Amino acid sequence: MEREPSFLRDLMLDALRSDGGAAEALLELITKHPEAKLKLAQAVAGSIAVPLNVAAKDDIKAAVEELKKWTEEKFATKQDLETTVEQLKKWAEEKFATKEDLKQYATKQDLETAVEQLRAEIKRIEGIMATKGDIKRIEDKMATKEQFEAIAVSVEDSGRDMVQYLLEQRGYKCVAERLRLDADYELDIYCNAGALTAVGEAKVRAGGRDVEKALERAQELLRRQPDKISGKLVPVFYTLVAEPSAIQKAKELKIWLIESKREVVTLDEVLGRM
């Protein structure tokens, strides 16, 4: 048996298969012998041990608690869901139009009414606006830029002629001309007669401010180029139509005012001769 352990094993297996008494005797022998009993226990434990990858009851309980905790952290509670619903409702109210909001928008009938009102307004405007033909007739009656310039030149020429003529009638010999000091400064009337120098402007229609400007320009000439002035400086203004304000201002400032072919404020008044 020491040389062939399998002989004893086979002998014992044959005994177990053939006779139940032999098996009982063998079991009693093994369970009473301490060393044999330990070997048998180890063999049985090795065959029925629970695998390490199988969860015990406590493992399952711990796993359930962990899953519950994770679920509470990851998923919304009832209160969270209610809060989310309220926020979503508020957002929808702000972003989307309500029935009351829609009432503020124009309906098809509103647009049709507005179009009719617009057409009526266009028709009214057309009734009061000048047509192309109306503008043409107005243009035919209006003076062109060249015509205005021609009128202005003729007024200046008339002014110079009249001033020269009136001075000669009083014994003052001079030639009335235009005086240009620089590109920005020009006088319509300049007549140096030695004993006096008439300096001024010419304009179709004159108001009070026009007369004042004529005086200012005459004084500017005296300040800038006094050599151009001989004798007494006589501010003069020639116009075809003198407004009341121009007449009043000319009398106050002692300006020689000539309207067409008559002296409204005479040269004698300006010189202090009555």
Image (cartoon, rainbow, N blue to C red):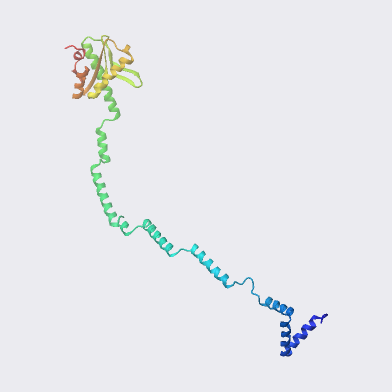
Q: Quadrant of the N terminus?
A: bottom right
Q: Residue furthest right?
A: 3
Question: On the picture, is 96 further left or further right than 5?
Answer: left
Residue 13 rendering spot, x and y as whole percentages: 75, 85
Task: Work out whether 171 lies above or below 51.
Answer: above
Q: Is residue 204 visible?
A: no
**Residue 219 visible from this viewpoint:** yes
Count of picture labels: 0
Placement of 228 over or under 40, stated as above or below: above
Quadrant of the drawing holding the C terminus: top left
**Which of the 4 image quadrants contains residue 258?**
top left
119 vs 66, nearest the viewer? 66
Q: From the top left corner, tell me how far across and down residue 104 is, in percent.
A: 30, 55
Q: Nearer the viewer, residue 79 or 62?
A: 62
Frontmost residue, 167 versus 23: 23
Q: Residue at (24%, 17%) from the top-left corner?
A: 236
Q: Position of residue 55 (x, y in %)?
A: 59, 71
In the image, is residue 105 above or below residue 208?
below
Q: Quadrant of residue 255?
A: top left
Which residue is pictured at 28% across the width and 22% down the height?
153
77 on left or right of 52: left
Residue 142 in percent (x, y) is at: 25, 32
Q: Nearer the viewer, residue 128 or 72?
A: 72
Where, by quadrant of the figure, is residue 99 drawn? bottom left
